[in-house]
Every structure is written in C-alpha cells, then in structure tokens.
Image: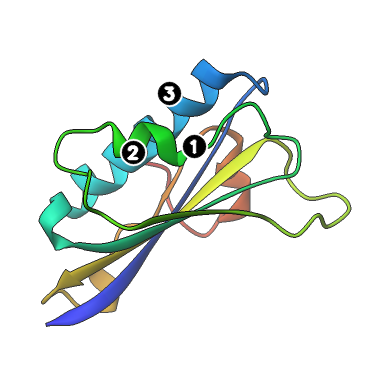
Amino acid sequence: MYVRGIRGAITVEKNEESEILNATSELLKTIVMENDVNPEDICSVFVTVTHDITATFPARTIRQMSGWDLVPLMCSLEIDVPGSLPRCIRLMVQINTTKQQNEMKHVYLNEATKLRPDLKPN
C-alpha cells in the first residue's frame, strides 16, 4: 500500500460563498470519480486558494459531504505570485492505494486547465 497524491484545481468567476463551495465540491467529486476512491481511502486533503478568494473556507463543503466528516482537511493561502491564475482553488488529495503514481488522474477544470496544459482535459 502506498500514499499517493492527486492534484486538482478549479477556478471561480466570483468571490461568492455559493460559487466557491460548489466549485470545490465539483472538483473533489471529479477527482474521486476519476480515481475510483472513497473517503475511507483518503489520508488527508490540502486545500489552497488564491488571495482573491475570501468569501468562505472551501473545506466547508467537503466536511458536509457524506462520509467525509473524519477526513483531515487543511486550508491555506497560495503564494501571491504576480501574473498567477486568479480565483483558483487547488486540492492535494492524499490517498492510500495500491495503484502506481502514473495511474493517478489529476483534474483541472475551468480556467485551471491552463495550469497543466500537458494533461488532457477531463
């Protein structure tokens, strides 16, 4: 059994609570579906946001998802690099798995596809 990381990112149009929560939920559900994992397999989830996302904690929506109440979550602020992608939520989902690193399917949605043009869109 290995601990593997799965990356993902999504952008929002506005710094609004409902949009942030919906985007975070969409991103996590897509990561889980693409990688065929369940909350019991999750070690932890790191959530970062760009400086322009302040309306709510994205982890709130994860905590409310069925089966996710015991998964350790941590929110943090991304480094504010000039010219970086605005209004971006990033996830690092760490899972217990027997899969190899090259089997992990990273997920980038909306404008965040620009962050990893080497990965084909989902």
Q: Residue beneath label 2, please?
A: 62
Q: Is residue 60 left or right of residue 13?
A: left
Q: Are marks 2 and 1 in contact (CB under 8 Å)?
A: yes
State the CA–CA distance, disc 3 to disc 2.
Answer: 10 Å
In front of the other: label 3 or label 1?
A: 1
**Residue type at numbered disc 3:** Asn
Spot occupied by residue 55 in the image (x, y as percentages of width and height): 64, 26
Identify the residue shown where x is 81% and y is 54%: 80
Q: Residue 88 is drawn in which quadrant?
A: top right
Furthest residue toward bottom: 1
Say the numbered circle drawn on residue 22.
3
Query: Where 95 sits versus 27, above or below?
Result: below
Determine which residue is flagged by label 1: 58
- Point 16% across, 34% down: residue: 66
* Quarter in which the C terminus is drawn: top left
Instruction: Give the structural element (helix, strand or loop) at label 1.
Output: loop
Q: Position of residue 22 (x, y in %)?
A: 43, 23
